[in-house]
Amino acid sequence: MRTGLQKWMLAVGAAAFFMLPLTSRAQLTTLDIASRDNMQSHVAGHTGHVDDGKDDYHRYCEGCHGDMGDGNGEVAQWLQPPMWPKPRNFQLGVFKCRSTPTGTLPTDDDLFDAITRGFDRSAMPIWSVFTKYQLANLVAYVKHFSPRFVSEKPGTPITIPPEPEVTPERIKNGREVFNRVQCWKCHGVQGMANGPSASTLQDDLGFPIAPFNFTDGTRPKCGDTDQDIYRIFMTGLDGTPMPSFADNIKPDEAWDLVFYLRTLMKQPSKAKEIAKTLNLKPVNPNP
């Protein structure tokens, strides 16, 4: 019969054996990320470097995004609705807010803009405390987590045509586009984020995600100018149920949709004034 000491030694040995694969994988992941320590960014007239962004990342970003950039920082587990979505997993190289076509990497400027803008209705604040040089370094640090930035180039930013004059005809056409591409299924017929699919939505990682509520006065996560809203239609929000409509609507129709959505928003706008004059009614998907 084995002695108590022998049994203890066997148990420790077995535990060490089963821990080896996990430890190896962790080391490999760490080494893989470290292999991109020479990653750079070129933005705002500065060249950013990973080493120079390390301290700021660990001080300001690691709590949510984690030291491995996988979105599993110490704070992440406490982020619940309405502070969702969960922190971005940088290792995947998938980003919502981009100027580039769906499925492609963002530009350095896109990442720079995301950090400085922050994300309304989330735990990601506006990081106005950083200098442009610090931001360039943080962009490089974010990029070094994902091998995609080595094997792929950023997409070519989409072209946004000049914004036309808002007219009653454009607003009414935008309402028809809203109905035709079924925006109401998620956003609701009045843009209140209460469409029939709203409660079922999940991001690509399986976390619940809410559609944007156009009526509550908050700003879209990827910017609140007309050009920003146009861009969201045409690039989509990768990693979420919001697709790109670049193959479904023409540029003129996209502008019409922008103008119609302005009529749903709480913020004052010329489109909202015109809609009031028209006594514009919500779409009726089941006439």
Image (cartoon, grey):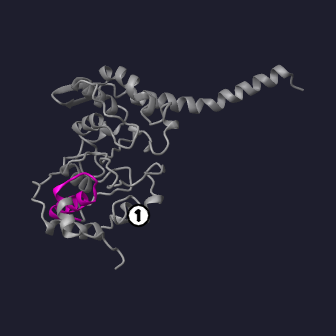
Above or below, comparing residue 241 to residue 196 in the picture: above
Tell me: 236 left or right of 158. Answer: right
Rendered location of residue 64, percent (x, y):
44, 33
Q: At which x and y percent is residue 9? A: 76, 22
**In the image shown, does 282 or 130 lie closer to the viewer?**
282
Q: Residue at left 23%, top 52%? A: 229
Residue at disc 1, secondary structure: loop
Residue at 21% from the left image edge and 59% from the top image edge: 272
Q: Residue under label 1, please give it.
A: 195
- Image location of residue 283, percent across then percent down: 30, 71
Q: Residue furthest bottom?
A: 287
Residue 241 versus residue 70 in the image, above or below: below
Residue type beneath disc 1: Gly
Q: Position of residue 140 (x, y in %)?
A: 29, 29
Q: Mark 1 packing: few (<14 Cα in 10 Å), some, or many (20+)? A: some
Number of numbered discs visible in the structure rendering: 1
As for residue 123 lying within the magenta part, the answer is no
Tell me the residue at 22%/26% (across/down): 132
Residue 257 on the magenta segment = yes
Residue 222 lies in quadrant: top left
The part of the chain drawn in magenta is: 249-271
